[in-house]
Amino acid sequence: MGMVTVDPGAVSASGPAGTGSMKVTISSELELPLFTAEGFGLGTPVTTRETVYQDDPDDPATASFVTTVDIEHGARLEVSTCCSAGGSDIDLYVYGPDGRLLASSTTPIDEEYVSILFPEDGTYTIAVHGWSVPAGVDTFDLTINAVQGYDVTVSDVPSHIPAGGTATLTVQWDTTGKAPGTYYGLVLMGPITAPGLLEVPVEIVVE
């Protein structure tokens, strides 16, 4: 087995809204044929306070909290719950655009987490099931982190990296029109058979 390294391992910058870029160098002891690299973002995680009720513990379809999120050009969809006021046992389910269950988290507490890599475009359904809500009703924090969009791009991408070779790519971002704040993205790279083999987080602060 050989190693593949990325330098720097993350892209970060701060400044006024606008465009910017940074060089990223890949060094590989392995041959990486049909190499691909793609940028996603920029966005911010969204946390809201929601309400859940006691549901039928034997039927996740009775989940009393349901919401949706739209994905376009997504790298990753992360959903998590925590911090119920009454210490309830809640479970988390995420369904794809076709209604099929894609991921679930069913620990015996209120802290649940799911992550979906390369979610296809479409509308995803997020359901929170009150498996055990002693008071009958409870509140909890829901965080949706959808890393998606076209504000991060990659150029100078080689089609092939030979064993022992290096390649330098350019990661570009565009925060034009964005309000001050911190925005996140992701660059996913690898051979076409494993396009998410390498991850480079992107964090841009608009001042």
Image (spheres, rainbow, N blue to C red):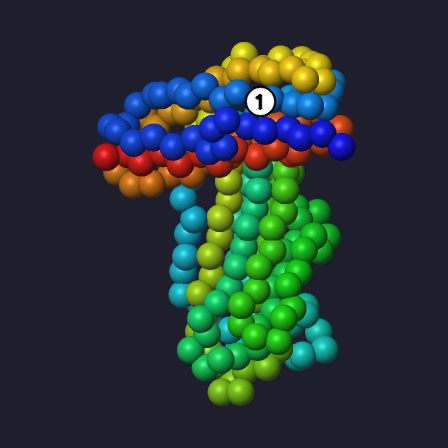
Q: Which residue is mark 1?
A: 26
Examine the rendered structure and indicate whether residue 79 appears above or below residue 201: below
Dot 1 lies on which element?
Answer: strand
Name the quarter where the C terminus is drawn. Answer: top left
Q: Residue 199: horizontal and vertical position, in percent?
A: 57, 35
Judge whether 122 appears above or below 67 on screen. Answer: above
Residue lying farthest to the bottom in this orientation: 135
Left or right: 188 in relation to 99:
left
Residue shown at the point (63%, 38%) measured from the top left? 118
Dot 1 alpha-carbon crowd within 10 angstroms: few under 14, some 14 to 19, many 20 or more: some
Q: Quadrant of the N terminus?
A: top right
**Residue at 55% across / 28% down in the picture?**
6
Counting from the top left corner in percent of width and height, residue 52 is at 51, 73
Residue 40 seen in this snapshot: no
Residue 158 appears in view: yes
Judged left or right of residue 21, residue 92 is right
Please state which of residues 188 and 40 is positioned toward the viewer in this rendering.
188
What is the count of numbered marks? 1
- Identify the residue shown where x is 50% and y is 32%: 9
In the image: residue 195, left or right of residue 187: right
Residue 142 in the image: state x and y as whole percent. Answer: 47, 61
Q: Is residue 65 above or below residue 29?
A: below
Judged left or right of residue 5, residue 175 is left
Residue at 38% in and 38% down: 183
- Amino acid on which disc 1 is placed: Ile
| Residue toward you, 48 or 65 | 48
Vertical placement of residue 120 versus 174, above or below: below
Instruction: List x then y, in percent, for residue 21.
Output: 40, 20
